[in-house]
Image (cartoon, grey):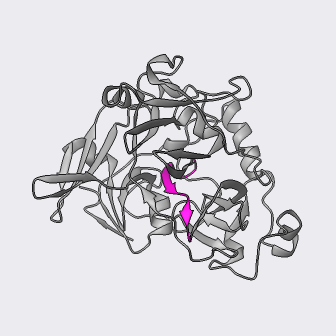
Amino acid sequence: MKTKTISSSSVVGYSFGALLLGCIVYLMGSVAAARPSEWQREWPRTDFSLHSVDYSEIQSGGPSKDGIPPIDRPQFELQSEVDGIGPLEPVVSVVIKGDARAYPLRVLIWHEIVNDTVGGVPIAVTFCPLCNTSIIFDRRLAGQVLDFGTTGKLRRSDLIMYDRQTESWWQQFLGEGIVGKMTGKRLKMIPARLESISRFRERYPEGMVLVPKYANTRAYGKNPYEGYDTSARPFLYDGDMPKGIAPLARVVRVGNQAWSLAMLKQKRSITTDGGLKISWYPGQNSALDTVDIQQGTDIGNIVVVQKTGSQQEEVPYSVDFAFAFHAFRPEGVIYIR
């Protein structure tokens, strides 16, 4: 990975509050060795003879299969009827054929995957808190519709998903099958935004918002990773760190290129020679800062469009931590300034 124009960044240590301490135990208390023969007992349908990654890179994050439960039958309410969520709280939003939906990180941080159908298109809404990576994938592949769950495993600190049809394992950051029958297959990334719920409400007055079916089963609205995005190092990652930028600084990724969020905040908007326009707007809480998400620092909103003549269309992007971009896109470039 290369960086363009190095700037300095400051980081602080972990905040050892009760929630974060519980998170450390949760993440690090059961780091298993890479033994497919042992995994087979929990994963009898997974073909471990097929894999594209070294099994030594895969770690247990603590939970068992679907120990972080995905949402399979999501429940929504009209955005104007949803209360209890701060105006600047982050949501992952998508619009397909006029069907506009928002998935608050206050919910996703506890479930990580939502299997849904929007505008007739089966999608998987995914969020890995350890990489800050939120991506929406098309669940259709090779003539079938896949449903996704969580393996409880991590690779390079990123969520490893699985599909229920073949029980193959998938790298969330890449949308790529890495173990089992689907090894080497790629999911299509769908254009989506990481934005505040207020911006979603302004754009889509009739939009729908994901709400938990059982609001008291988890601490929705609370961040179990207090202070994580200002930490010096990521959890369960001992790989190379990016140079010239803090490991947990946010970057906006499009393909093999990324732009520092701090730089975008300063410039407000940039347009590449290829017509890619990336814009930053204030007013979105970090979900990985304070215990109460609606009190998180303002990291801003990102919009990415491709301009072609007088036309423009939104393109898929993600807002990742710099270490994750470096880990999965080592040949990529991060633009600092």
- Quarter where residue 163 is shown: bottom right
Q: Return the x and y of residue 216 as percentages of the image width and height.
A: 72, 23
Q: Nearer the viewer, residue 304 or 82?
A: 82
Instruction: Report if residue 326 is visible in the image.
Output: yes
Marks counted in the figure total 0
Q: Which of 155 and 4 is in front in this view?
A: 155
Q: Quadrant of the N terminus?
A: bottom left
Q: Return the x and y of residue 271 as percentages of the image width and height.
A: 17, 55
Instruction: Report if residue 12 is visible in the image.
Output: no
Majority secondary structure of the magenta segment? strand
The residue positioned 62% from the left and 65% from the top of the image is 170
The part of the chain drawn in magenta is 128-142
Q: Nearer the viewer, residue 304 or 202?
A: 202
The residue positioned 60% from the left and 39% from the top of the image is 109
Examine the rendered structure and indicate whether residue 313 appears above or below residue 163.
Answer: above
Q: In this view, does 241 lie to the left or right of 212?
A: left
Q: In this view, does 133 lie to the left or right of 312?
A: right
Examine the rendered structure and indicate whether residue 26 appears above or below residue 165.
Answer: above
